[in-house]
Image: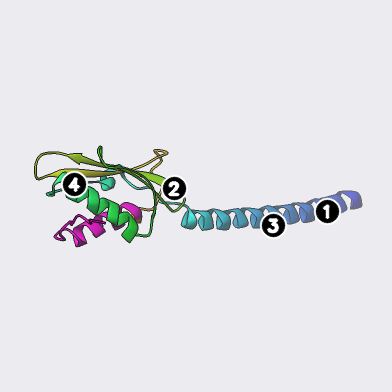
Amino acid sequence: MNIKKIFTAVLIIYLSLVSGFYAKTFAKEDELEAAYAQTAAQYTNYRDCIKLYKLPFEKLFYLALSSIEGSKFELLEIQSRNGYIVFKAEDKEFLISVYKKDKSSTFIKITPCDNSYYFSPQIPQKIFNYIVAHYNNEVKELKF
């Protein structure tokens, strides 16, 4: 009988220690997941990356180009004839496409180059806010 009591006591102590260890391990994993969720990029809806402006094609293209500089993003490539701009923000590459709808209306679309919409929604918002803020500015040709 003494051996059964000793065995039972040892088993209970062992199980309580093991369960306490696992509880601490799972608590640390939950803390790590919460920290990762805060630092991970948010999902941006593709509908938030398209806007229609009552501006001619050239003016909207130049405003989009200057919004990249104004937002302190890195400009990688420009193709002015087709209205394409490639830039880098937060270690991710994006493509701005400017599409002519009619004489006075033009679309602007921001697409991540890797087609993953897990990035900060502030990136397209900065560009669109810059365009709205400089909507009435005159575009002038610089002569060198």
Determine which of the numbered discs, if any, sits on residue 112 in the image: none
- Give the mark nearer the N terminus: 2 vs 3: 3
Look at the picture and state if 10 lies above or below 104.
Answer: below
Residue denoted by label 4: 58
- Give the mark nearer the N terminus: 4 vs 1: 1
Image point 20% across, 62% down: which residue? 133
Question: Of the residues shown, which amino acid type is indicated by label 3?
Answer: Gly
Q: Position of residue 88 (x, y in %)?
A: 41, 49
- Range covered by the magenta-colored residues: 123-144
- Give the mark nearer the N terminus: 4 vs 3: 3
Question: Of the residues shown, which amino acid type is indicated by label 2?
Answer: Lys
- Give the mark nearer the N terminus: 2 vs 4: 4
Look at the picture and state if 57 lies above or below 67.
Answer: above
Image point 68% across, 52% down: which residue? 22
Residue denoted by label 1: 10
Helix, strand or loop at label 1? It is helix
Question: Of the residues shown, which amino acid type is indicated by label 1?
Answer: Val
Q: Nearer the viewer, mark 2 or mark 3?
A: 2
Residue denoted by label 3: 20
Q: Which residue ends up furthest to the left in the rendered image? A: 103
Task: Find the distance from the CA under tag 4 to the CA under tag 1.
Answer: 81 Å
Q: Nearer the viewer, mark 4 or mark 3?
A: 4
